[in-house]
């Protein structure tokens, strides 16, 4: 029988398989570029740049996300109940107390950010605080602490940077290839075939990377749901919170598509559509109905 524990383990290995696929895709893009220009150093440059960009974005990701989200720090005195709730759950999870922020937005939502558990932050909207009861809010905070505990912050940042890097790299070299041409002998059929394959890869790689990013984001949400339920021992609280959050019809004012995957629910809630196979490929979050059902079906 499937349990919260097996659901958590399953999502962990599936996520790392997807991450491995990301790095394979970068290697393939690097190979395509280096083959077209007959310069293997381009492959090494692509890999080195991806590592450098990952390190830089990882180090400053929390400051960037908090700034563009309009988050403001709070204190125990200003938000006594929220502060104590985060503190108590952090102790239960064995985590350092994260910084706590609020966003002045009527849309109910929350996210966690920071480069590691020692430099983490939990952010909730004022709409979330006014909509949920204490048990539901506890479920949401436990979900966000689970993201910190599971190192989702690092993983999410790496994925975002890799998607951007692959897109920029593909666009740059595709333009050079189409307008400048490669250095291989075009009369050689094998070379022509490989060059065409490389160009096709450069065209498709941004879309492949985007689909992989969304897949990883969805897996991490399922994992955080399961881990949060383990922390509170009451999955019904998070399930009820997700039901209320999904029932809000408006969009967040401060959200943008670059950070949408960080939130506990899609901040662009008004753009709901059918959840067919193709639609799911580009969803940052699993359908709320599936998340609620998974929470209610898992036996502790």
Image (cartoon, grey):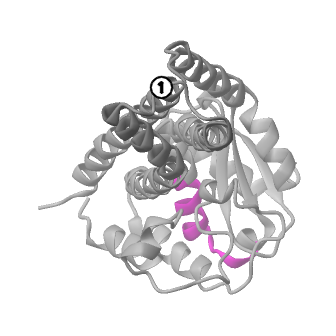
Q: Which residue, given by chain and number where applicable, does mark 1 sit on?
A: 184
In the image, is residue 140 above or below residue 46?
A: below
Q: Quadrant of residue 256?
A: bottom right
- Looking at the picture, how far across and down is residue 171, in whole percent? 65, 44
Which region is colored magenta?
130-143
How packed mark 1 is, by other alpha carbons closer than 10 Å (few <14, some 14-19, many 20 or more), is: some
Q: Main secondary structure of the magenta part?
A: helix
Question: Is 154 on the left or on the right of 290, as rendered?
Answer: right
- Looking at the picture, how far across and down is residue 59, in whole percent? 71, 25
In the image, is residue 268 above or below residue 55?
A: below
Q: Is residue 250 magenta?
A: no
The residue under the point 32% across, 49% down is 11
Question: Is 200 on the left or on the right of 106, as rendered?
Answer: left
- Looking at the picture, how far across and down is residue 247, in whole percent? 60, 86
For this rendering, which residue is in front, 142 or 185? 185
Query: Furthest residue to the left?
Result: 1
Question: Is 259 on the left or on the right of 88, as rendered?
Answer: right
Q: Quadrant of residue 154?
A: top right
Q: Judging from the image, what secondary structure is the residue with disc 1 in?
A: loop
């Amino acid at each position: 029988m499937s349990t919260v524990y097996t659901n958590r383990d399953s999502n962990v290995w599936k996520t790392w398989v997807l991450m491995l696929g990301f790095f394979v895709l970068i290697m393939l893009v690097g190979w395509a570029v280096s083959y077209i220009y007959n310069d293997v150093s381009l492959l090494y440059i692509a890999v080195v740049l991806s590592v450098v960009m990952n390190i830089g974005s990882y180090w400053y990701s929390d400051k960037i996300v908090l700034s563009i989200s309009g988050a403001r720090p709070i204190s125990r005195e200003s938000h006594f109940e929220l502060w104590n709730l985060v503190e108590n759950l952090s102790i239960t999870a064995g985590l350092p107390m994260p910084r706590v922020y609020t966003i002045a937005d009527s849309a109910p939502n929350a996210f966690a950010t920071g480069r590691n558990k020692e430099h983490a932050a939990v952010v909730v909207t004022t709409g979330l605080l006014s909509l949920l009861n204490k048990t539901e809010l506890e479920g949401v905070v436990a979900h966000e602490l689970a993201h910190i505990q599971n190192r989702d912050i690092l993983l999410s940042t790496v994925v975002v940077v890799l998607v951007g890097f692959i897109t920029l790299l593909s666009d740059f070299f595709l333009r050079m290839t189409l307008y400048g041409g490669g250095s291989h002998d075009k009369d050689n059929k094998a070379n022509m075939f490989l060059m065409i394959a490389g160009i096709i890869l450069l065209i498709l790689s941004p879309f492949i990377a985007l689909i992989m990013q969304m897949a990883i984001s969805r897996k991490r949400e399922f994992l955080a749901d399961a881990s949060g339920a383990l922390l509170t021992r009451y999955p019904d609280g998070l399930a009820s919170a997700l039901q209320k959050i999904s029932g809000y019809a408006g969009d967040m004012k401060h959200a943008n598509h670059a950070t949408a995957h960080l939130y506990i629910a899609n901040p662009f809630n008004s753009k709901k559509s059918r959840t067919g196979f193709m639609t799911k490929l580009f969803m940052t979050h699993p359908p709320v109905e599936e998340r609620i059902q998974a929470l209610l079906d898992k036996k502790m």
